[in-house]
Every structure is written in C-alpha cells, then in structure tokens.
Image: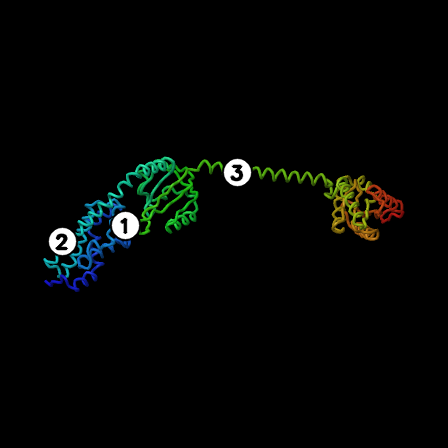
Amino acid sequence: MIKIINSEEFSYFLRVHRNEIIKRWMNKSEVQNVLHRHSLPTIEKNTHLFYEFCDCYISIIEWRSTISECQVKIDFLQLLNNYNVTTADLFTLITKLKNAIESVIFENGNLSYALQSEIDALTLEMANDLAVNFESIIGSNKNYKSENSNLLAEYKKAVDLSNIVSKTNPKGVITYVNDKFCEISGYTRDELVGKPHNIIRHPDMQRETFKNLWDTIKAKKSWNGIVTNMRKDGGQYIVDTTIIPILDVDGDVVEYIAIRHDITELEETKQQLKNINKAMKQKVDELYSMTNTLEQKAYRDNLTGINNRENFEDIFAIEIANAKQNNVPLSLIIFDVDNFKLVNDTYGHQAGDVILIDLVNLVASNIKNGDIFARWGGEEFVILTPSTEMNGARNLAENLRKIAQTHTFSYVDKNMTLSFGIAQMSIEDDKKTLFEKADAALYEAKKNGRNRVEMYNA
C-alpha cells in the first residue's frame, strides 16, 4: 500500500478522478432511487449543484476546506428540500458519495486503513453539519408550505372544475388527465394515460398547426391556439388551448401542462353565422343583379338594346343644359327607314325586327364615343352628338346613309335606305324646339325623295 494521506499527490489524484467519482456516485442504485422517487434532475443534465457539492466534499477530504466553508451546501440542501427529499435520503446521498470516492481510491491501490478512517470521520462530521442545516431549511419552509398548501389545493380544484387539463412528458405521452378531459373526449383515464397525445388528434387539423405548436413549446415558450380534437366515438370538439412547458432548476423541460376551454358551441355558432352571412350575400348579389337587369330594361329598348325613348329624353335635357353652360355646340339627328311599312307587310314583323336589330348594330359601330343613340319609336331613331356642329353632324349622317344603302339586310331582296333630318341647337332652344327642328328637316328629306340628308335652316 502507498500511503498518500496529507500529500499533494492525494489532492491531485482526487481532482484527476473527479468525473469518475461523480459518475459512480450518480449511478449507484440507491442514489437513482432517491432521484426518481423525488423527480430530481439527473447528473446527465449537467446539474451544476451536484458537481459543485461533490467538489466541496472532495476539498474537505483533501483538508483544503471545512464543511463550514462549503458555500454550495445551502443551495444543494435547498434543491433537495424543493423536491421534498427527506433527511434519511440526504444521508443516503452523502454515504454513497463517500463509497464512490473510496472505491476509486481502492481500485488505484491508494486506500489505507488510516485514510479510510479519516474519510469516515470527515464524512460523519459533514453529515451532521448538513443534517442540522437541512432541518433548519425544512423548518423555515414548513410554515410557508402549510400556509399556501390549502390555497394551492383550492386553486387546483378550481382549475380542474372549470378547465380541461392534461399533462404530458417531453415526448408527448400523456401522464395525467382530469375528469373534464375524460368527459369531453369520451375516453377513460386508463385509456389515455401512457398514450401519445395524438390519440385525440382530428384528421382535419393541419400538420402545420402542430408543427408550429411543437416548435414553440420545445423552445420553452407557451403556445395558444384553437384546436379541433376527435372524441372516442369519432365526433369532434373544439378547444381554446394553452400549453405551458414546465422547467426544472436547470431550465430543461420536465413536462407540458395543457389547459383547454371547450368552445365547440361558440365555434359552431360562428360557423352558422358565416353560412348565414354567405347565403345573405348571395341573395343580395342576386337581388342586385335583378335590380340592375330591371334598370337596364327600364332604360333600354326591348328589341334593339339601345336607349329607349324615355331614357333618351332624360339624357337630352341634361346635354342641352351642359351645352349651354359650357357654350359648346350640340346637334340632333333624326332618321328612319324608308318604306319600312312595306317590309313588315311583305316579309312580316319578325323579319322587320331582324332588320331593325341589324341596322342598330350597323349604326352603333359607326358613331363616335359620346354620341347618344336611341330608338324613338317603330323604325325611327335619334342620335344626339355633343360638341358637334351642323356640318359635323351632316358628315356623320351622310356616312351612315351610304353605309346603310350598300349593306345587305336579311329577308329583303333590295337595298334599304335611310332618311335623315339634322338641327343644331341655338341659345333659345330647349329639348322640344330642337327636336321639332330636326323633325322638320326629316320631313323635308322624305318630301324630297327619301334616302337623303336635310339640315334645318331657320
């Protein structure tokens, strides 16, 4: 045996084998039992307090410090108290740490009887000191716990009664559900605990929603959103869900707690309102379309689709007022189809209607934008040409006359001709007098042989 007690070699040896000592300590079955029984964070999560306490213990064994100088002991004891570790469990942890140190020393041939006796004595002294401090910490927290335990119990009861609550481990496996969870899902507690939480996932829920959920809570942040779940019988229910990560002292996720509110009825009502609004909008659109169609019919000639007489007269009055106010010219053209009565008598009114429609399309495609074209009645039509003097109106009428004369109309075996009368508004004219002037010019065109353009001359 090599006796290294009181030597620098011994201190160096302990520092070199520090990690091996901690590993052996934490892997001992008795230590594991304490950790699991109280849900203490394990050494694999790099719990700094376990390392620092071990370092403190080693420094005492090396005679570099005393237990009273070990600053970390209070934090370590407070950690154990937070997890309801008992004094007996504390002695187990200390004893097994001593055993781990002795086994490492023994395996390297350095454990003498004197050294072992010294370690035992120092450990006993340390254990007594820790026990006194631990009892003091337990005592100081007992009153606080007793004062708040009833409040916490009542709070938990209130949450359980008013909310749907579940807990899962970090992998999403259910570890707890309350009665309301079972009631709304249709599953028993035994059917839920130990199962992945997606047992109630509804197939209509988008994968992107759950990806966002998991990304958020894995980042140790709370998540809130609307989730549609599926009952055991295949029905659905909708919940406003908040999921909160629960962290240990090292900031690692221990579990997730989900608190939900049933909003199925609210969401179904909202959907019904959406459907009603959609149906109402559709009806409004239909009514608007019908109204628009009726308005079009009110303003349009039923046969040809151009302005009817009533609408033209309204426009006529507006254009006269505008021309006078802005001191711009305004001309009116009246024309009709020569000998149209003979067409109706020879080929029938249906043939006459086809010819009038063809004529309207022909004229409409050869007037300028801004001209107002209307059917005055029967085979008689009017064209109001804003900002156009007599000669401009005459050129337009003459062009239309030639186009109609050379156009081939259905049913008739000879060319159709048109007669035109034109008048330009004077400052004294109103709607009635301007129309009478153009009508008089049309009469002259008829009297002078038809198929011609006549202008009103005062």
**Disc 3 marks which amino acid?**
Asn
- Name the mark nearer the viewer: 1 or 3: 1
Q: Looking at the image, is mark 2 or mark 1 nearer the viewer?
A: 2
Classify mark 3: residues with Cα within 10 Å, few (<14), some (14-19) or many (20+): few
Tag 1 secondary structure? loop
Residue closest to the eye, 426 or 22:
22
Give the crowd class for mark 1: few <14, some 14-19, many >=20 residues within 10 Å: some
**Disc 2/disc 1 C-alpha distance (Å):** 30 Å
Mark 2 or mark 1: whose residue is earlier in sequence:
1
- Residue at 70% x, 39% y is 297
- CA distance for labels 1 and 3: 53 Å
Tell me where residue 149 sits by quadrant: top left
Q: Amino acid at mark 2?
A: Ala
Q: Is residue 256 visible?
A: yes
From what the image shows, is residue 329 above or below residue 62?
Answer: above
Mark 2, residue position: 121
Q: Position of residue 277 (x, y in %)?
A: 55, 38
Q: Which residue is mark 1?
A: 41
Residue 182 image position (x, y, % from top left): 35, 36
Label 1 amino acid? Pro
Residue at the disc numbered 3: 275
Q: Residue 390 has which mark?
A: none
323 shown above or below 7: above
